[in-house]
Amino acid sequence: MTKRPFLGWFVSPAGLVALGLTAAMAAVFQFSIRTYIPGSLEVGGFTLQNFAAMLRPLYALAFWNTILLCFETAAFTLFLAYPLAYALVRTRSSAVRSFILIAAVTPLFLGEVVRTYSWMIVLGNNGFLNTLLVKLGLVERPVQMMFTAGGVIAALVHVTMPIMVIMLAAGLSHIDRNCERAAESLGAGPIRVFLTITLPLSMPGIVAGFSTAFAWTFSAFATPQLIGGGRVSTVSTLIYQLGFSSFNFPFAASLSIIGLALSLAVIALLRQATRPLERLASAT
Amino acid sequence: MKRSPAVMALRWSGRVLVAAILLFVLLPGIVVAVTAFNDRAILAFPPQAWSLRWFWRAFSYSDFGRGFWNGLTVTLWASSIALVVGAAFAIAIHRYTFVLKSVLEGILLSPLIIPHYTIGLGVLILASQTGAGRGFPLVILTHVLLVLPFVMRSTFISLENLDSRLELAAASLGATPGRILLTVTIPLLLPGLLSGWLFAAILSFNEFTATLFVSSQATQTLPVAMYNYVREFADPTLAALSVIYIAVTALLLSLANAFLGLEKILNVDAH
């Protein structure tokens, strides 16, 4: 018997797929340093012009807006998902648990288009929210919610909720309840137990959820495209527009490279900044 | 145990908060469901008259039918290829050390953090440079790249829970490595492989952004057809389609929850 039976059979298909992915990423990189020839799909010689052009206010602003949008979305998602995850893990009724689980997880499997479309009906000028507000007499004319950053954030929070709930619940379910019981027996009230025991111990889940929400929002396309309607430009909508409206694939490629580098940097910074908190959680 | 009024107030406000958040989660689905039965062709709320005609239009609109079958083709190929490639690789990672192991693993897991549009753009540029057309193989390749990490992860979790003494027992009784793999390892991994395949299939069927980049008119999947529809028309057809989508998905998840326990699949099992 050999020590590593079937190693070649197990690894070579995966190696082939990895090669394909590497080639695709190399293609993006290679295109990002090529000259754009207007009206043609061919590319010219090597240049750094694409990266220099990104310093123009239009593109710099899109990067800034996207990062801001991602932070706001991740933060709102965290605040809404935490109570849900907490209820999911801690409820004693299995019916309540199943209901929360199905309600929170179903949207994950619906895809971005269905979810974004449903928010278009909620936020539109003749949509659900505006009809409600007008009928209640709270506003005289419909409030513009479509094509605004606020509308995009509301829909994106909804899109990232399921994965955040799953990650927070995974974190919360691995907490040793005896730590909380010990604090209670020493006379701590429920709020104090939550703030000094549960919350710090759930930090790994919070960090994982927040950075995943950030990455997901950064790669969201249908939501900013349809709800933003061209008036909220993000890195993803710009890349699509450059690629499929002006066929400027070199510039689209360089935007992708910078976008990828930027989102990786932000996630690495997030992890770095929250490391002391995580260490605190693992020490207890 | 006696509870003070303050604790009770805290509990009830917690319940109200959770109910409000659940309302936010469910609201779009409810609004879509009501809109789907609206008789009028504009997206106004609430509907004045009711009808089922948007369901008929959703079924008879040829792009949706073609998108559904295209999507099914891509999904079945992509999730099956990903299952074989990903499961084999997960076993190799779990058991063996080999050259470039962590590099290969890192590359194959990277689609979890690389935006889908970047991968779509890369595959598209690669196809145009190598002269490969925008046919089904291109869409399937893209989907394999995107769902592979999920199959790998699911197989890996099953491998962690596998009792390796069973394989040792088979080996001590004289079974060849091939026989052990087919009669011991794979049957024991089957639930993990199956849930990994199912997860990959659902993700692939719903994938939109990367598919938009690499598909053509002939290979567009259902989400791409739906996106194109919503940009051209503003009637409730898509709402009707969404209702079918939501109903089927919720049904599948309820079944998965009843038979397999969704908590286990999603690793949120309470202790």
Image (spheres, coloured by chain):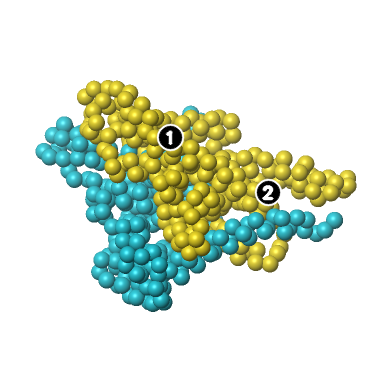
What colour do you see for chain A?
Answer: cyan
Badge 1: few (under 14), some or many (20 or more) residues near its Cα, within 10 Å? some
Q: Which chain is tinted yellow? A: B
Looking at this view, is A281 or B251 the one in front? B251
**Does residue A232 lie above or below B230 as drawn?**
below
Q: Secondary structure at mark 1?
A: helix
Q: Residue furthest left?
A: A140
Q: Secondary structure at mark 2?
A: helix
Q: Residue at x 46, y 70 (%)?
A: A30
Residue B242 numbered mark, or none? none
Q: Which residue is mark 2?
A: B159
On the rendered structure, is B93 left or right of A93? right
Q: Which residue is mark 1?
A: B65
Q: Position of residue A283 (x, y in %)?
A: 55, 59
Q: Position of residue A111 (x, y in %)?
A: 42, 43
Q: Position of residue A250 (x, y in %)?
A: 38, 67
Dot 1: chain letter: B
Can I make out residue B228 in this image?
yes
Instruction: Identify which amino acid the numbered label 1 is placed on.
Output: Gly
**Does residue A58 lie above or below A139 as drawn?**
below
Q: Residue at x 32, y 25 (%)?
A: B53
